[in-house]
Amino acid sequence: MTELQKKHPKALYMLFAVEMWERFSYYGMRGILILYLTKSIIEGGLGIAAENASYIYGIFAGILYATPMLGGYLADNYLGKRNAVMIGGFLMMLGQFSLFAMNNITGLWIGIAFLALGNGFFKPNISSIVGELYEPNDTRKDAAFSIFYMGVNLGALIAPLIIGYIAEDYFTTKTAAGEIITFGYKYGFLAAGLGMLLSQIIFISLAQKFLGNKGLLVAKPQNLTAQEKQDRALTKTDKDRITAIFIFSVFTIAFWLGFEQAGASMTLYTDRYIDRAIGDWTIPTAWFQSINAFFVVSLAPVIGWFWTTRKGAQISTPTKMGMGLILLGVGFIFMLGAIAQRGGDNTNPDIKAHYLWMIFTYLAHTLGELCLSPVGLSVVSKLSPARMVSFFMGVWFLASAVAHLLGGVVSGYVETLGAQSVFMLLSIFAIFAGIVMLLITKKVQKLMHGIS
């Protein structure tokens, strides 16, 4: 039986379920967070100005993706990956329940602090455990991360639908004067917390059965001889591959800076200027964030399969990432179409753009994501020295942290410069970065020393 014909281990599907419910928790919270920040108090929000709310969102997302480097280091050296996943899950659950229990600025900062810290323990280590299921040169690894990525996006698909309905519809009433009163956002955070609880129940009850010793902390040898120390030292190949990780990380900043506008500026644009009415019913804004996840769940098996074919296997990781960036830029061109339909950057909320512009935007962004994100997770697990995998997963997510911080700043500029200027610049920037990545593909491949 060839390597491509081998079935994936059952542990992959257990980790798929754990990640699915953790992502249900995260994306459910993310789907309503910017709305919770900006809606008035009577609408169940905190009444923060949109520009300031975008900065808060960017700071939170930046810290969220900065903590994995610390969590990866602690897991590699002191905790083990499985313990780190459990600690992270518990902290994130506390974060969601804090947002539910305290609907004020204090509760906001306590909640997002727990979420950011917990993510640092959880995120890099569950990805590293997936990598441990396969030998370094197993060609099924890219496909495995695409399957795992389906778990991410299955959770991201159902979360905004359920939690968006809870937050924006189920607990909402209108006064005789037509004012909207809702208590739904807090119960949306409660539902997100319950999703995190379910994720932890699955992991704690099934990890030993399916993982065996994988993900446990390996005791470090003491009193190494000179030869053993030399054997453990980083070789030139290791250093070249680490350089490749950092190059990929720089380009992933360009990708996530644009992609994560979905949680901030694109959500606000959808809420204000996209026609969401179907008869007398208005589609909850958060539901539009399920479009990306729907496309991922639909397309990830096809893309994952394609990477294992002869033609797909010939496409290098740098090329895939370059394609992903270009597709991101194409997505913002569709956003510009929505703006053009409304006649430019006018602020009249009665002039709406067709929802198809958002669907095409999310389709292009999803195709870009599938070229870059699961492939990136896979290549980091391949390029990292074996004893430092979780740490370099943390480095990978640190790049996302920088992107999210910058993305929050960019989202804030939509309020001052206008959506048309910002989305046009994002489109040009992403396409340019993608072309640069394609041009340096051969040089980066050389640094990878045979890793594809």
Image: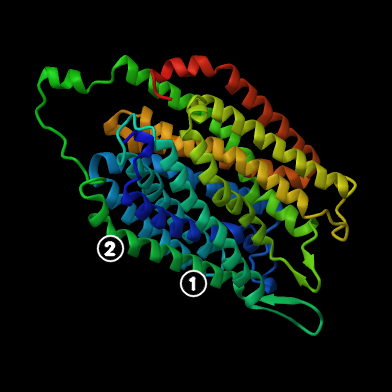
Q: Position of residue 246 (x, y in %)?
A: 46, 26
How is this picture coloured? rainbow
Compared with 425, 436 (above or below) is above
Residue 55, percent across and down? 63, 48
Question: Where, quadrant-wise, is the N terminus in this rendering?
Answer: top left
Quickly name the residue at label 1.
Answer: 101
Near-viewer residue (121 or 16): 16
Residue at point 41%, 32% (across, down): 380
Task: Please identify the quarter of the rendering in which residue 203 is found.
Answer: bottom left
Q: Which residue is mark 2?
A: 205
Instruction: Give the mark, 2 or 1, whose residue is nearer the N terminus.
Output: 1
Kind of residue at badge 1: Ala
* Image location (x, y in percent) of residue 451: 39, 24
Mark 1 secondary-structure assignment: helix
In this rendering, does residue 400 appear at all?
Answer: no
Q: Quadrant of residue 436?
A: top right
Horizontal arrangement in the rendering, residue 445 relative to residue 286 (left or right)? left
Q: Neighbour class for label 2 at 10 Å: few (<14), some, many (≥20)? A: few
Mark linked to residue 224: none
In the image, 287: left or right of 398? right
Decide if residue 272 is on the left or right side of residue 311. Answer: right
**Residue sitting at the far front:** 1
Kind of residue indicated by mark 2: Ser
Q: Residue at x 28, y 20 (%)?
A: 234
Residue 282, image x, y percentages: 75, 68
Distance between the alpha carbons at the discs numbered 2 and 1: 28 Å
